Image (cartoon, rainbow, N blue to C red):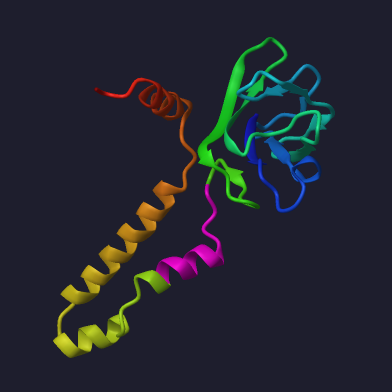
Amino acid sequence: MQIKAFLPNPEGSDASGEFFVVENNSSQTQSLSGWHVKDLSGKAYFLTGVLEAGQEKRFEAGSKFPLNNNGETLYLITPSGEVVDELGYAGSALEGRLIEKTPTLTQEIKENIFQANAFSAAPSEIVQANNTLVPTAIFLGLLVATVSLYVLKNIPKSREEIMFEQFEKENPIQ
């Protein structure tokens, strides 16, 4: 079982658009009776229903379980009280941005990456002009590095990173 994603700052009203998604990533059907999700402030949302193996379910957070727009972590807790998963972020959530376990490389993100790092000539033209594969390899290396950096910047921060940042803010080096 895992928290697959959540939307803390939907476009429009937060009360009617916030949600989180729980996924049964096991090979067995799982009753959700007794399972719950807690947030950073300690509020709890008790889950209901059954999840088949590989199935996911969306839960509307609503006004009973409002999600923070400025840093939030959700914890998935078993009926026995064990935290089995968590998903969070630090900083301000962009409106409409889904916080996901695995970032998705959308068409918009691809276009932004490639437009920001585009060369005026295609790789095949570079090879023909210089009669070597080195410029193509350099181009592809830069492209991979740029995509990697973009993805790394958009991975939600761990609880430890969030706590360290809070500690640094509260205890500045003199």
Q: Residue at x 44, y 24 (%)?
A: 163
Horizontal arrangement in the rendering, residue 15 relative to residue 87 (left or right):
right
Where residue 63 sits, quadrant-wise, is top right
Horizontal arrangement in the rendering, residue 55 relative to residue 2 (left or right):
right
Where residue 8 sits, quadrant-wise, is top right
Residue 78 drawn at (x, y percent): 68, 17
Horizontal arrangement in the rendering, residue 147 relative to residue 42 (left or right):
left
What span is colored magenta in the figure?
103-114
Residue 7 drawn at (x, y percent): 67, 43
Q: Residue at x 81, y 28 (%)?
A: 64
Q: Residue 132 in magenta?
A: no
Residue 82 drawn at (x, y percent): 62, 13
Q: Residue furthest top?
A: 80
Q: Residue at x 70, y 49 (%)?
A: 10
Where residue 21 sits, quadrant-wise, is top right
Q: Residue furthest right?
A: 49
Query: How many badges with numbers are in the image?
Result: 0
Q: Residue furthest front?
A: 174
Q: Closest to the observer: 31 or 40?
A: 40
Q: Closest to the observer: 122 or 8?
A: 8
Residue 84 visible in the shown view: yes
Q: Residue 112 in magenta?
A: yes
Residue 55 visible in the shown view: no
Which quarter of the rendering shows the C terminus? top left
Residue 116 drawn at (x, y percent): 38, 70
Work out whether 96 lies above or below 15: below
| Magenta part, dominant SS | helix
Work out whether 62 lies above or below 117: above
Q: Closest to the observer: 43 or 56?
A: 43
Which quarter of the rendering shows the N terminus? top right
